[in-house]
Image: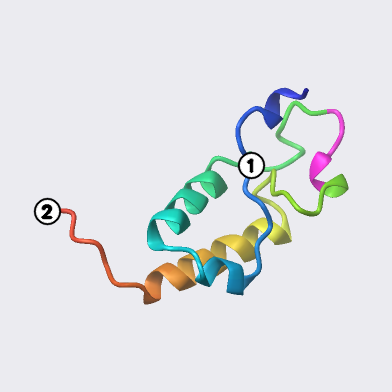
Amino acid sequence: MLLCLKKKKPLVLSFKELENKVTKELLAYLKRLHQCEASFELSDLIENIDLSNPETIYFKQTEKWKTAYSDVKSILKAREHLDKKK
């Protein structure tokens, strides 16, 4: 198994699927998006697994990452803000 597959990578989810998640799940998904590598070119991989696996996001410099990130941020922006003092 490839080293980069050890950590759970975010799945490609539709906007509707993301909307149906609770805020805690969205924040966890956002965290997984942030943990993706910057790009295939900057990784130490020989093969770009992002191209062969359309259901999973591996690199930030892809349309599927950018779409997922934008969708999550848009949904979170519309959600009730959490009070950190509690």
Q: Quadrant of residue 41?
A: top right
Q: Which residues are magenta?
A: 46-50
Instruction: Kindly report the distance in space between the C-alpha atoms of the residues bearing marks 1 and 2.
Output: 31 Å
Which residue is painted at 79% across and 28% down in the image?
Answer: 45
**Which residue is disc 1 drawn over?**
9
**Which residue is disc 2 drawn over?**
85
State the quadrant of the N terminus: top right
Q: x%, y% of residue 8?
A: 61, 37
What kind of colouring is applied to the model shown? rainbow
Q: Quadrant of residue 16?
A: bottom right
Comes first in the chain, label 1 or label 2: 1
Q: Is residue 54 left or right of residue 59?
A: right
Which amino acid type corresponds to the residue marked 1 in the rendered image?
A: Lys
Of 17 and 42, which appears nearest the observer? 17
Which residue is painted at 42% across and 63% down in the image?
Answer: 22
Circle 2 residues within 10 Å: few <14, some 14–19, many ≥20: few
Q: x%, y% of residue 82?
A: 24, 62
Q: Assign a secondary structure to mark 1.
A: loop
Number of numbered discs visible in the structure rendering: 2
For this orientation, the residue located farthest to the left is 85
Residue 49 on the magenta segment: yes
Which amino acid type corresponds to the residue marked 2 in the rendered image?
A: Lys
Q: x%, y% of residue 25?
A: 45, 55
Of 59 and 86, which appears nearest the observer? 86
